[in-house]
Image (cartoon, rainbow, N blue to C red):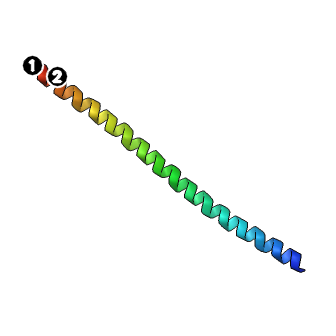
Amino acid sequence: MNKNTLWTALGVIVAVVIAIWIVQVLFSVMWFAVKVLAVAIVALVVFLVLRAVFRDRSRD
């Protein structure tokens, strides 16, 4: 095994480790964005329901 082959193998291992780390970070960010979106949708629905409930009571 010559020096070039060793550096190539080491480069491949480092590239795979960096790629795994980047993918984990991206999935964490995407999962956080999905959770924020879900919270925003639920908050909007709750707001609309509360507004409808209080609007109906104030008309009486």
In the image, residue 41 lies at what x, y percent? 38, 37
| Whether residue 44 is situated above or below residue 36 in the rendered picture | above
Dots 2 and 1: beta carbons under 8 Å? yes
Against 49, is 5 above or below? below
Residue designated by label 2: 56
| 26 left or right of 44 in image | right
The N terminus - image quarter? bottom right
Q: Is the residue marked by circle 2 packed among few (<14), some (14-19), or many (20+) residues within 10 Å?
A: few
Residue depicted at x 66% and y 65%: 18
Q: Can residue 1 be seen in the rendering of this structure?
A: no
- Spatial CA distance of label 2 from label 1 is 7 Å
Residue sitting at the far left: 60
In the picture, the disc for residue 60 is 1
Can residue 19 be seen in this snapshot?
A: yes
Q: Quadrant of the C terminus?
A: top left
Circle 1 crowding by C-alpha within 10 Å: few under 14, some 14–19, many from 20: few
Name which quarter of the figure residue 21 lies in: bottom right
Q: Helix, strand or loop at disc 2?
A: helix
